[in-house]
Amino acid sequence: MTGSPLAGPPPSPAPSWTTALSSAGGVKEFPPGSPPVVRAPLGPSGPFTAGSQSVRGVDLGHRFTGTDWLFRGLDFELEPGLITGVCGPSGCGKSTLLWLLAGWEKPCQGRVERVGVERIGWVFQNPHGVARRTALDHVAFPLLARGLSRRRAEAEAEALMAGFGLAELAERPFAALSGGEAQRLMLARATAAAPDLLLVDEPTAQLDARTALTVSTSLGQIAASGAVVVIATHDPAVRAACHRVIDLGAVP
Ligand SMILES: Nc1ncnc2c1ncn2[C@@H]1O[C@H](COP(=O)(O)OP(=O)(O)OP(=O)(O)O)[C@@H](O)[C@H]1O
Ligand SMILES: [Mg+2]
């Protein structure tokens, strides 16, 4: 890895997921396969400026009634164009941190600041869909909600599905998809909603390595389009492919 900082707008097509980033934005450079643990405040701006939104955690901590602190004193800033991994062992609070970022749970300590975030996309750990609706309907729906005609929505949905390796499954009812197919469908649906902030919980848990790579590449493209992307993951390959990592296993 060279030491030269990246600067300017995101390259097109999407930057490689394994691109190491400049220290100018507060992100330390790292060799491939070992992204940095974010333990300190990050700078105000990184090298990618496609979107104008940001999500900041300030002295963030959380515990549930009857549990110890899951994490405390987290300071970070998430910027458009960057993929942040939330890592650590089962039960350390990865999903909880995503809930805090979405504003669905109020932190016990500190705060989450969201600036310019109007649409939040979620891909849950367990994919939920409408059993009898086709795969295509699931992806077309957010496009229809955004005002596209049915014809355009279905055409765009088909293109998105192809990007997630689902081209052959458009007419298949949701109930007849495998776990991995359903998970990729949820990613395609979240992409169709064009979120400012995309929160993804364990995106590759049910996928083989090759399919997981497809998902990783697609998520990289979503980030490069200007979304803030946060991924909770156990998967070392996904962790290695994130621009930065919040390692809850390393938080005291
Ligand atoms: N509503 C709740 N009330 C009490 N405890 C909770 C609640 N939600 C989660 N917890 C506990 O908080 C801890 C963190 O849960 P969380 O789901 O965030 O972990 P995780 O890191 O996402 O785990 P996994 O990798 O297994 O998905 C767990 O011990 C869990 O049992
Ligand atoms: Mg979880």
Image: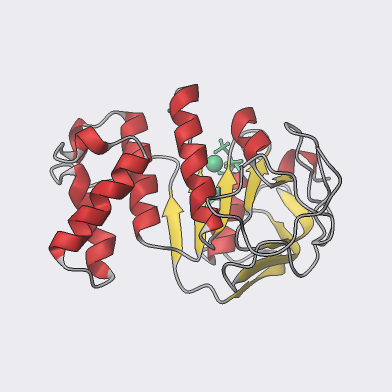
The answer to whether any part of residue 237 appears in the image is yes
Quadrant location of ligand 1?
top right
Identify which residue, 160 or 119, lies in the foreground.
160
Is 236 situated left or right of 249 in this image?
left
Residue extending furthest toward the bottom? 116
Looking at the rendering, which quadrant does residue 80 occupy? bottom right
Question: Image point 24% across, 47% down: which residue?
Answer: 158
Give above or below for 201 relative to 61.
above
Q: What residue lies at 59% left-to-right and 62% top-to-bottom?
A: 101
Residue 205 at x, y = what percent?
48, 30
As drawn, the residue found furthest toward the front would be 12
Residue for point 74% across, 38% down: 249
Image quarter where the C terminus lies is: top right
Residue 37, image x and y in percent? 79, 44
Q: Is residue 224 left or right of residue 169?
A: right
| Residue 202 appears in view | no
Above or below for 238 versus 6: above
Question: How far across and how far down the image is residue 71, in percent?
Answer: 74, 51
